[in-house]
Image: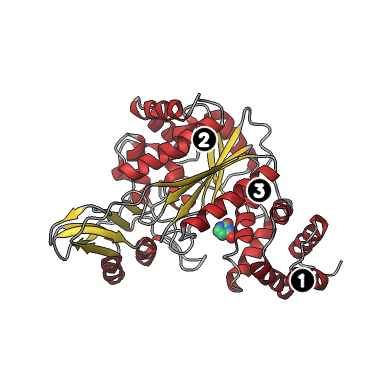
Amino acid sequence: MRMYDLIRKKKLGGELTTEEIDWMIQGYTRGEIPDYQMSAMTMAICFVGMNERETGDLTLSMRDSGDKLDLSAIEGIKLDKHSTGGVGDKTSIALLPLVSCLGVKLAKMSGRGLGHTGGTIDKLESIPGFKTEMDEESFISQVNDIGMAIMGQTADLAPADKKLYALRDVTATVDQLSLIASSIMSKKLAAGADAIVLDVKCGSGAFMKESDDAKALAGAMVKIGAHAGKKCMAVITNMDEPLGRAVGNAIEVREAIDTLKGKGPEDFTALVLALGSRMVLLAGKAADLKDAEDKLKAAIADGRAIEQLKRFISAQGGDASVADDTQKLKVAEQILELKAPSDGYVQRIICDEVGMCSLMLGGGREKKTDIIDPSVGILLKKKVGDPVKKGETMAVIYHNDAVKAQAAYERLMAAYITGAERISPKKLICGEVDR
Ligand code: URA
């Protein structure tokens, strides 16, 4: 086979065979196919597209390009959950302990934040002592012991995707549906779970800004799951304003803890219950969605959920007493309050801008090598639809640097759109794909 012929075939609208895709992906991973030929191919895919079979084959080939986790030593059905990323998305930190209370086994690999979106691993590391690096054996034995584990992604999981993603990032070829879906699913499939629940975010803080694009991505990923013989479903959820009220690292963990005690923000609690009930149902631990949701609510109300979070934190070396006393999570002492410019309503909060403000304070990375300050962040006192009085606090900025805080303040002020008319917040669940 010659890469030149494959590029030409795709450019002319052709369909790549399973063998051609695998030859190309394994050759690229081994360094035998140069970046310039691969970037010509990804650009051809951007213009011509890939059909369902090609997308599935691309995913499986990337899945098989490196290590794969073998979770067969864990009894029962193993579930994984993935979010396409957003602002204030601390969902896994509350969701996994809650769902595992009902006997669902959860083995999850998570990523770090990049750009305006945060990452679960960075958030968890704001808990004193918490370790996110673990070997496969400890990961599996923790799931067997306490029902759940979350670890950082290992270097050699789907290395083809790692290489290809870095190439797409600099050749304007990230935003192609088959390439995104296969990139996400190759890592999920290599991580070994039997069933996967996908939270596809939609809106100004998400990768997919438009509902139709989010639905198409959800559909493509669910089909890939089926192609790989996994149970897979997707929920499309609103990311047009930040999720919950906390955006940062330590303050998001604090909000996840409050939620497991039944004192979380309404939207975040609703999302955790919506995803959680689908996971419980997929694992066969409830008769229907209502039954699953009732069981989850009971686990919050009787304290099992917060106890499970403590077990999880201890198992990964962290100080579980943060769940009893959230003051132990270090939040920056200096604050700057964002005041409403006039009476009215919050009509919009430009979501990715709030993420950028958190990043500017030091809560995220501009480059992979940047070191995060877990104590900074933004607490949204007012959300879309809330009334405000002139001079009332709409948000609080927690910071360790007055210059950075002032820049974040100006950006946050521009992200908060207020006006005389009340606008209802968007629906949390925008759609669902199951097959
Ligand atoms: N996230 C991924 O892992 N891959 C993509 O292509 C886009 C988002």
Are the two marked residues, 1 and 3, in contact with CB atoms closer than 8 angstroms?
A: no
Q: Position of residue 29 (x, y in %)?
A: 74, 62
Which one is in front, 322 or 255?
255
Which quadrant is home to the N terminus?
Answer: bottom right
Name the amino acid type tagged 3. Ile
Q: Visible in this render: residue 392? A: yes
Residue that numbered label 2 is attached to = 279
Is 174 on the left-hand or right-hand side of 44?
A: left
Name the amino acid type tagged 2. Met
> Does label 2 or label 3 sit earlier along the sequence?
3
Label 3: few (<14), some or many (≥20) within 10 Å?
Answer: many
Q: Position of residue 166 (x, y in %)?
A: 61, 67
Which one is in front, 38 or 307?
38
Q: Position of residue 148 (x, y in %)?
A: 53, 35
Q: Name the residue: 71% across, 70% down.
A: 41
> Does label 2 or label 1 sit earlier along the sequence?
1
Are the two marked residues, 2 and 3, in contact with CB atoms closer than 8 angstroms?
A: no
Q: Name the residue: 31% across, 40% down.
A: 264
Which mark's residue is nearer the viewer, 2 or 3? 3
Label 1: few (<14), some or many (≥20) within 10 Å?
Answer: many
Cα distance in 3D space between marks 2 and 1: 41 Å
Q: Name the residue: 52% across, 58% down.
A: 213
Using the image, tell me which numbered label, if any, was put on residue 7. Answer: 1
362 w.r.t. 63: above or below: below
Is 253 on the left-hand or right-hand side of 103?
A: left
* Outermost bottom residue: 36
Which quadrant is home to the C terminus?
Answer: top right
Helix, strand or loop under label 2: helix
Q: Position of residue 367 (x, y in %)?
A: 50, 68
Residue that numbered label 3 is attached to = 224
* Outermost right residue: 1
Q: Visible in this render: residue 33? A: no
